[in-house]
Image (cartoon, helix red, strand yellow):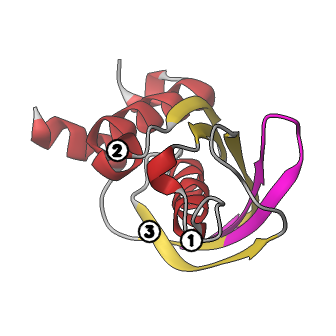
Amino acid sequence: MTESQRTPDELARACSDAMFSRDRATQAMGARLLDSGPGRARLSMQVRADMIQGHGTCHGGYLFALADSAFAFACNSYDEATVAQGCSIDYLAPAVEHDVLTATASELSRKGRTGLYDVRLENQRGELIALFRGKSYKVRGTVLAQESKDD
């Protein structure tokens, strides 16, 4: 099936699946791709013992990485290769070992070569752990063309 024959949801899922299959960092964290669609994505990750820092909570780098991955899947959902132009995160509550975190990315704006995305990071109780904002920049190429080169 060509990109033009796919619905926007099918195209977004194909892009997410292709990216996830190549994303060793996200896989190594134990993250799972739960859902994706045009301009949105949802990933989850369980906090492991090796993710705990000196204060007994999940290291902020893992929280950032999970949110950044959700952002990446959301902004690449149109089969246009897109990278981060800038990101920020606000840590609001600690995550602890065994917590299951869900990162939900949603598109706020997408015009020309840039986009703006928010990611909510919540634990299994629905408590807000962090808020992430990412700015995207469209570069040359497509997500699915990369998949064809790898085959």
Q: Which mark is residue 54?
A: 1
Question: Quadrant location of residue 36?
Answer: top right
Q: Is residue 134 left or right of residue 48?
A: right
Crowd tier of the residue under label 1, counting other residues whose Cα lies within 10 Å: few below 14, some 14–19, many 20 or above: few
Q: Earlier in the sequence, mark 3 or mark 1?
A: 1
Disc ID at residue 83: 3
Q: Earlier in the sequence, mark 2 or mark 1?
A: 2
Q: Measured along the vertical axis of the image, is residue 26 above or below residue 151?
A: below
Q: Which residue is mark 2?
A: 28
Q: Residue at x 34, y 44 (%)?
A: 28
Marks 2/3: CA distance?
20 Å
Residue 46 found in image quarter: top right
Residue type at numbered disc 3: Val
Horizontally, residue 46 falls left or right of residue 99, namely: left
At numbered mark 3, what does the secondary structure look like: helix, strand or loop? strand
Question: Could you say where residue 1 lies in the image, as x and y percent from the top left?
Answer: 35, 17
Between marks 3 and 1, how big is the CA–CA gap? 32 Å
